[in-house]
Amino acid sequence: MLAINWGFALLVTVVGMVVVFLLLIVLIWIINLQTSIIHGSKKSPKRVEAKVDSAVTTEEHPTPHEQAAIAMAMHLYFDAHDEEPHVITIQEVARRYSPWSSKIYSMRNFTK
Amino acid sequence: MRQITKYLLGMAAFIGLFFVPFAAGAEEIDLAEKMTKFVNDTGFAKIGGENWTCIIMILLSCVLLYLAIVKKFEPLLLLPIAFGMLLSNLPGAGMFHAEFFEGGQVHWESFRNASNAGILDYLYLGVKAGLYPCIIFIGVGAMTDFGPLLANPKSFLLGAAAQIGIFVTFLGALALGFTFPQASSIGIIGGADGPTAIYLTSKLAPELLGPIAIAAYSYMALVPVIQPPIMRALTTKKEREIVMTQLRKVSKTEKIIFPIVVTIFVSLLLPSAASLIGCLMLGNLMRECGVVDRLSKTVQNELMNITVIFLGISVGATATADAFLNFQTLGILCLGVIAFGLGTAGGVLLAKFMNLFMKNKINPLIGSAGVSAVPMAARVSQNVGQEANPSNFLLMHAMGPNVAGVIGSAVAAGILLSFMG
């Protein structure tokens, strides 16, 4: 155990952790920069409209949970089906004969 | 009937006449000697004597097969690994020769005589060249959605913190008497990333490839067992109940630019990590750009599956009795679980630390997902979070540190490779 070069071991450990953190922190910065460039260029002409809308809807209200609850309530209110009796019946036809269902009118009548 | 008898006698006479000249010139063969040779050539005869350890390895591979098939412990990899282990430990089969790769070098002269080399020797060349892990990384990239990470870039910090397990275990392995390259390979188990562990070990300590791969994949399968007690011990119920704000929607442009930027930046800073990060990001770019759907589907399915089979069998083949049945393996298994535990603790503790400064609190449970093991670790965060607050959904939040962990462990592997390689 004494033969191990602990100085080098600690160097690898410290440099390793620092490089991992630094590299990923720089990636955070790059992503934030990329996001701001992309969204900045897209949003710039719409910013005025967004301000007008901000009075009506904010990011916080309604929260996603509230939105889900409202959506569910609206779905139940508007889209709910009528309650049906679930009883299937075959109604007896009272008057069996009708010219509309008479076969005689759908067949050729040979006079001979 | 008489006709048939006559015909058969005629045929016998003809065959006899045909073989007389050959029988006259045939050399004398000692049948007893041949039979003895045949019996001695069987695997059963070779099991006795020096090769008794093969029985233990065969039993061990059967246990691993049981874990893969019945318990479903990472079966996609554990099954080929266990079967590769079984094949290379069959006495007399000669399917894998560790001596062909002794000293970390490929002894090409051994391959010249094709009858010397077994099928697993040829398959192992892909591991030796670092080919399989990189191909798998292309597939992993094509299956990974970096959206949650882009929506919440702070997740990168959690992915970085979870890598502490790698470096602390590296020190622990040195203390146990492993060499620097071996300790680096053992430490990378803490990254909970199979291909990265195999890639680094095949470069630095190929003699430990079998035990390290088995430890890495076994512990990855045991993530739902290892992580929750650590997560509960390090957090209060109130912290586990924290509900995080919904992630923003990430545009397609951001998702396309991300892999290109990461590849350029990381490869320039750490060229030794370029092959892993480059392959990961290539796969991701194929997925996100939307113009090479066929390639994306291929690397996610066919190419990935074929490579997993080759990788699993050849890595399992390295677990021969000589390489596996020793105290080093026991040490690797113990250090591996410590590495996982420390990585989990590192992520959770950093999340708690970040909460001291952040306005929008993060649930510390997502920190544990920083130890790659995609998506198992994220699922564990979700499950432990829902135990505390059933209406809490942490899965997508945990996917951020989870995929950050993949990048983090590849970077850590690159650092170790540049120091030890």
Image (cartoon, coloured by chain):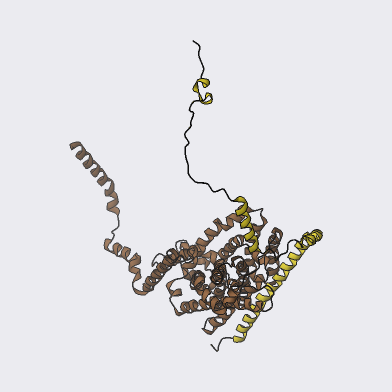
Chain colours: A yellow, B brown
Residue B237 location, quadrant: bottom right
Residue situated furthest left in the rendering: B2
Vertical relation: B24 (above or below) B273: above
Q: A48 or B146, which lies in front?
A: A48
* Residue B207 falls left or right of residue B46: right
Q: Is residue B281 visible?
A: no
Vertical relation: A105 (above or below) B132: above
Q: Is residue B248 visible?
A: yes
- Residue at position x 54%, y 79% from top? B233
Looking at the picture, how far across and down is residue B369, in whole percent?
58, 71
Residue B166 location, quadrant: bottom right
Looking at the picture, how far across and down is residue B392, in whole percent?
59, 68
Residue situated furthest top in the rendering: A112
Looking at the picture, how far across and down is residue B112, in whole percent?
50, 63
Vertical relation: B181 (above or below) B275: below
Q: A24 or B391, which lies in front?
A: B391
Q: B135 or B27, which lies in front?
A: B135
Looking at the picture, how far across and down is residue A55, in whole percent?
77, 62
Residue situated furthest front in the rendering: A94
Question: How many numbered marks does the figure carry?
Answer: 0
